[in-house]
Image (cartoon, grey):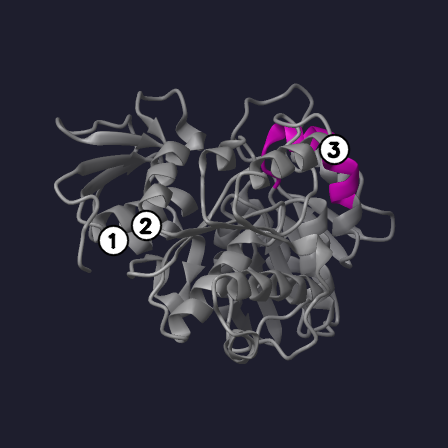
Amino acid sequence: MSELPLAGRRFYFVGIAGAGLSAYANFARAWGAEVGGWDARETIFLEAVSDVEVDIGGEPAPPNGFEVVVSTAHAGRIGGRSRAEFLAELVSFRRSIVVGGAHGKTTTAAMVAYVLRELGHDPAWIIGGVVPQLGGNAGVGEGWLVVEGDESDRSIALLHPELAAVTNVELDHHATYASEAELAAFFEEWLAGVPHVVRGWELEPVDMKLSVPGEHNRENAATALATLELAGVDRRAGERVIGSFAGVGRRFELVGERGGIRVIDDYGHNPTEIAAALHTARELQPRALIAVYQPHVYERTRQLHHELGTALGLAEAAVVTDVIDGRDAPLSGVTGKLVLDHVPAGVRRGWAPTLDDAATLALAWARPGDVVVTLGVGEPWRIARAVVEGLSA
């Protein structure tokens, strides 16, 4: 590219194995920076930064002269800039498109970046998931910069793009917002400062053939196409390309199929997203649907355990693990069993405190013709992979 905005700078990303910071690290490197980082444990996102020097375990130890960028999950562990502040700097360098919302922002942002690239607009992008058709979770071009914004900690308000899209508004972060009305007001206050805006909930789902299944993806595509039009893309050209978009890693991703059993992994972690994933799995016409859920965030689990259990009741069988230690501290009496206890009667229920327990139980229950869907923010993909490996054995 003609200019490398971060040339000569050095960054140490604390939480580099996360979906977000792995993308930021890749992007910083592509824009000319020297990059290193730390994380508590390995994840699938380290594959995206495989040639970066990464410290695993212990405590982060940035080399002298490195600027430290800290993920939300490790806030307070070490001094440094937040990932939101770093993203705000990147957005300030380019004409930018920011996609926010409770559900679908990763897929919608990926759709926008994919169409822009396929139509020769040479975009840059930072996506909170691996997009195989784009070659990863970050890429650099001379055109629009497409990124996701995060409302969970209000940090999307730090971003000042030329164009913004909000997919939908639903309360998902109870420690940050007291009500959905407060969340809606927050989004509207942010959008008031953006020149061009798309509100996804005002649009009809697209009525066209897509390569990604589910009604929620027809809604995502509608938001993406409206955003692309504001970015100067002809609607018919956008529709022609978006139909070939094949999806994002951990978004209804087929991990494997063995012995007539299909194993799918999905990022869905709140009631709406879990229901969407299971409705989509139902379209595969399984003999039985087995849902395996890893709860994330104690406050969400406390607030929504009834709704989470109800959503899992869309399957014939539900396996629930204990809560993964995410953004908040443990709460007395709040475990994954709260969710499992609210799975409707008539659904086979299994308590599996650890990921290994969950994989063992899913393997024991699965029969030819079944579909196993692993769900959650943390590492349910490990369950999915273990089930596929177990079926192979």
Front residue of 278/98: it is: 98
As for residue 212 lying within the magenta part, the answer is no
Number of marks in the rendered image: 3
Residue 6 figure quarter: top left
Residue under pointer 2: 46
**Among numbered discs 1 and 3, the one appearing first in the sequence:** 1
CA separation in Å, label 1 and label 2:
6 Å
Residue type at tag 3 = Ala
Residue under pointer 3: 181
Are discs 1 and 2 less than 8 Å apart at CB?
yes
Are discs 3 and 2 less than 8 Å apart at CB?
no
CA separation in Å, label 3 and label 2:
38 Å
Are discs 1 and 3 less than 8 Å apart at CB?
no
Residue 347 % position (x, y): 81, 53
The region drawn magenta spans 295-309
Q: Residues within 10 Å of mark 1 (few under 14, many from 20)?
A: few
As for residue 296 lying within the magenta part, the answer is yes
Q: Residue at x 56, y 62 (%)?
A: 224
Front residue of 71/386: it is: 71
Q: Residue at x 75, y 72 (%)?
A: 287
**Helix, strand or loop for the magenta stretch, by majority:** helix
Up-down: is 352 above or below 111? above
Residue under pointer 1: 50
The secondary structure type at the circle numbered 3 is helix
Residue 180 % position (x, y): 73, 34
Point out the residue furthest to the right here: 345
The secondary structure type at the circle numbered 2 is helix
Residue type at tag 2 = Leu
Residue 136 figure quarter: bottom left
Residue 30 appears in view: yes
**Among numbered discs 3 and 2, the one appearing first in the sequence:** 2
